[in-house]
Amino acid sequence: MYKVLLLGSGGRECAISWKLSQSPLLEKLYIAPGNAGTSAYGTNIAVKPTDFPAVAKAVADLGIDLVIAGNEDPLVEGVREYLAQAAPGVLVVGPGKVGAALEGSKDFAKHFMARYGIPTARYMTVNADNVAEGEAFLDTLAAPYVLKADGLAAGKGVLIISDLAEAKASLREMLGGKFGKASAKVVIEEFLSGIECSVFVLTDGTGQYRLLPPAKDYKRIGEGDTGLNTGGMGAVCPPPFCTDEFMAKVEERIVRPTLSGLKAEGIDYRGFIFLGLIDCGGEPMVIEYNVRMGDPETEAVMPRIASDLLPTLVALAKGNINEAAPLEIDPRACVTVMAVAGGYPEAYRKGDEITGNLQPAKSIVFHAGTTADAEGHILTAGGRVLTVSSLAPTIAEAAALSYEALADIHFADKYSRRDIAHEFIG
Ligand code: AMP
Ligand code: GLY
């Protein structure tokens, strides 16, 4: 039996909590800090994931056996290393600081891919000392131009610019501090066109791994993939273009070389690897690595895991994932549709009461930005408020169920895209 502490507070953590709460091996689940939805599956504790002394104290006081990092910030800042000192013996799902640089530094990730021949866009890293070379590299590329802040920039650090002069000006602005320290280095990339998908690898540091079913998310706020980028407005699992043939290429060209590269560099990576991929005419290329699960992809992936996930996470953290039985995957499709607060992804409303049916019979509501007040009312507390996931034999039926359940949930200025998964519906 395991006492588990999950770090994070979004829809992803709500979906992971929901899944873990069904495990017969779970003794107790704590979520730090969690949201109004996670409290149905475990106990929320008022601890910030990046406040490492407070995390270590919670591990000791609550007798935690396993810590799962939901989001990247604590990993990039070194929570694994901190706990290894302050709470020796506790199992951790999530890489150490060096492994987390796969997400925390685009420059590190691109060099890593280059070293191991992993297919990705051509690139050059530029800093204040080689701006002229950076501009010359831009001259060799065709529009549009992709500029990426090296460090974490809250999902906003990637610019795609169609005009060359504007790209050069933006390069200088980024190096001048447009994204603070995160853009002291900028990765310039060749633009790749194709359809994007997310592949999730669970690995234990030895090169052994398990794949979760792939998913596709919808990043733009507007229907037809228009408007500003968001954290994600919905997801479908699996996307039909991720065929067995495509996934075999992903394993052979990307997953295995990534894991053997990590091993070759002495990086004991125990956690999730999220491959942000683009399907370029049937050939998978890596857009980015993340060191956590995707959000809202998790909300479409977790409902499809039919067997217990906890033994896999424990075995992964112990360094022998193959000790756990293979995961069983539900053959049905899952579609999740996010409801966001008016104004998101710019300044948005908060504190509006959420009413309606939050426990629909045929769907699951995962809370993202919600909180409960003293009287137990559920209030909006974030840009992405909640997401509704449904399983069904077809994507069309799953989407229809999610939209039906979403129509019964109300808060002021609620907004959702109406076209999630629509391109896969006949
Ligand atoms: P990233 O933060 O690296 O995932 O980039 C954010 C988004 O920018 C991705 O999800 C893609 O839609 C887009 N993007 C990033 N790199 C490229 C590229 N080389 N070619 C085309 N689109 C890209
Ligand atoms: N949905 C994309 C991400 O989690 O980064």
Image (tube, rainbow, N blue to C red):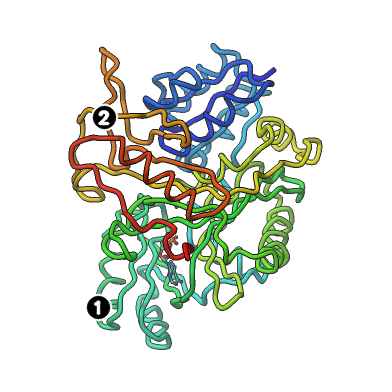
Location of residue 220 (image quadrant): bottom left
**Residue at 45% over, 55% down:** 217
387, 14: nearer the viewer: 387
Horizontal and vertical percent position of residue 391: 53, 44
Ligand 2 has an atom within 8 Å of the beta carbon of the residue at disc 2: no
**Residue at 41% over, 25% down:** 33
**Amino acid at dot 1:** Glu
**Residue at 75% over, 38% down:** 319
Horizontal and vertical percent position of residue 151: 42, 55
**Amino acid at dot 2:** Ile
Reading the image, the residue beneath label 2 is 354
Ligand 1 has an atom within 8 Å of the beta carbon of the residue at disc 1: no
Reading the image, the residue beneath label 1 is 166
Work out how far the residue at label 2 is from the one at label 1, CA to CA, in angstroms.
43 Å
Report helix, strand or loop for mark 1.
Answer: helix
- Left or right of residue 366, residue 270 in this image: right
Location of residue 163 (image quadrant): bottom left
Classify 17 as above or below 394. Answer: above
Task: Name the N-terminal-most of marks 2 and 1.
Answer: 1
Classify 361 as above or below 198. Answer: above
Horizontal and vertical percent position of residue 181: 34, 54
Horizontal and vertical percent position of residue 357: 34, 29
Please rate how many residues cluster around mark 2, counting C-alpha atoms within 10 Å: few if below 14, some from 14 to 19, many from 20: many
Circle 2/circle 1 CB separation < 8 Å: no
Report helix, strand or loop for mark 2.
Answer: loop
Q: Nearest to the eye among marks 2 and 1: give it.
A: 2
| Figure quadrant of the N terminus | top right
Query: Residue 20 bears which disc, if any?
Result: none
Please rate how many residues cluster around mark 1, counting C-alpha atoms within 10 Å: few if below 14, some from 14 to 19, many from 20: few
**Residue at 31% over, 71% down:** 171
